[in-house]
């Protein structure tokens, strides 16, 4: 652990200020209560509990997860108890912790996104993340694959929501830079790249997909090169901050995303097999920044030489 207090780890995502750039991704950290015995939550840059929807969802049929040779395939289907249960049972605990809480929301329509963002934004959370990119539900990526739809949802949510708005985008598009521009023009404080990559696994003996949903989202080390490419492309296309997501499990992974153009990162799949990874990366970050001669995170963001 570095003892160099001269290194400033804080970072800014539009109107959202974080103590450090290491966040934990929605859907991989439960509601944080599950991790409190192994992770000092106050050390994290931000916690994103699992995505919530207007009404309870039972999710997809099993199997919901399949391990691959370089990652995890999932088709959970946004299983959650709905916004009212979240507000009553989970939000009080989350807000009792000394860590910024960013709430991920997903809607079937623009109006649902707006209503959720407005409701959550009134409850004192740090920010709202619009999950425009879940590949495991019907219509889940509709707003993240069409620039016009993306702009309309982000713009309406931004106008209705009192706190910063982040837009989480899908890589399952021809040009993610075009979608990111639409989100930025709609007023997103930051764009989050990337959600999972649409994929599938097959049991050839049964001649059937292994996931109950047929297809799902691939995460973990397998998608890191894709995520880095997306961050680099979007960093060249928009001026809003970027949150990098995809296969991050070490300080080297984190630094690669920062240099590529991300102002913060979210740790996802690695939480399942190493829930302390986020704190370890935070401990290693000062020395990694110092190695590049930097005294703060922003000095290295987007410094990739190409």
Image (tube, rainbow, N blue to C red):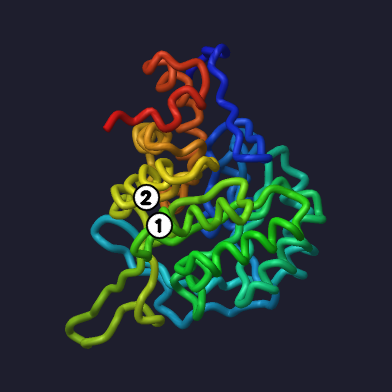
Q: Is residue 96 left or right of residue 211?
A: right
- Work out whether 98 lies above or below 113: above
- Identify which residue is drawn at 79% across, 54% down: 92
The residue at which mark 1 appears reads as 176
Q: Are marks 2 and 1 in contact (CB under 8 Å)?
A: yes
- Identify which residue is drawn at 35% across, 53% down: 220
- In the rendering, at what x and y percent does residue 161 appear? 75, 56
Considering the numbered disc 2 on the image, is that residue within a helix, a strand or a loop?
helix
The residue at which mark 2 appears reads as 230
Name, please, the residue furthest toward the left: 205
Q: Is residue 76 left or right of residue 10?
A: left
Foreground residue among 58 and 223:
223
* Quarter of the picture holding the C terminus: top left
- Work out whether 241 lies above or below 300: below
- In the rendering, at what x and y percent does residue 216 appear? 38, 72
Foreground residue among 55 and 90:
55
Considering the numbered disc 1 on the image, is that residue within a helix, a strand or a loop?
helix
Q: Is residue 81 visible?
A: no
Crowd tier of the residue under label 2, counting other residues whose Cα lies within 10 Å: few below 14, some 14–19, many 20 or above: many
Crowd tier of the residue under label 1, counting other residues whose Cα lies within 10 Å: few below 14, some 14–19, many 20 or above: many
Which sits earlier in the primary sequence, circle 2 or circle 1? 1
- Identify which residue is drawn at 29% across, 81% down: 209
Q: Is residue 55 left or right of residue 139?
A: right
The disc label shown at residue 302, or none = none
- Work out whether 235 lies above or below 295: below
């Amino acid at each position: 652990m570095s003892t160099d207090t001269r290194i400033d780890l804080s970072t800014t995502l539009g109107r959202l200020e974080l103590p450090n750039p290491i966040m934990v991704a929605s859907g991989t950290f439960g509601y944080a209560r599950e991790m409190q015995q192994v992770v000092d939550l106050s050390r994290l840059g931000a916690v994103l509990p699992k995505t919530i929807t207007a009404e309870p969802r039972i999710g997809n049929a099993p199997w919901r997860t399949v391990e691959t040779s370089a990652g995890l395939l999932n088709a959970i289907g946004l299983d959650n108890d709905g916004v009212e249960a979240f507000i009553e049972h989970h939000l009080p605990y989350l807000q009792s912790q000394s860590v910024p809480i960013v709430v991920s929301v997903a809607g079937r329509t623009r109006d649902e996104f707006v209503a959720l963002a407005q409701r959550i934004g009134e409850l004192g959370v740090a920010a709202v993340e619009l999950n425009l990119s879940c590949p495991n539900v019907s219509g889940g990526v509709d707003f993240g694959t069409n620039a016009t739809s993306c702009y309309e949802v982000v713009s309406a949510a931004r106008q209705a929501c009192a706190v910063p708005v982040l837009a989480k985008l899908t890589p399952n598009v021809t040009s993610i830079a075009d979608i990111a521009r639409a989100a930025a023009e709609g007023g997103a404080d930051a764009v989050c790249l990337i959600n999972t990559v649409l994929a599938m696994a097959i049991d050839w003996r049964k001649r059937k997909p292994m996931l109950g949903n047929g297809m799902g989202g691939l995460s973990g080390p397998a998608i890191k090169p894709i995520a880095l490419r997306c961050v680099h492309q979007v960093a060249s296309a928009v001026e809003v901050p970027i949150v990098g997501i995809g296969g991050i499990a070490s300080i080297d992974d984190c630094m690669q995303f920062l240099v590529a153009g991300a102002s913060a990162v979210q740790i996802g799949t690695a939480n399942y097999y190493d829930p302390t990874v986020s704190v370890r990366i935070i401990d290693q970050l000062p020395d990694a920044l110092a190695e590049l001669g930097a005294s703060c995170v922003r000095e290295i963001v987007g410094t990739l030489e190409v």
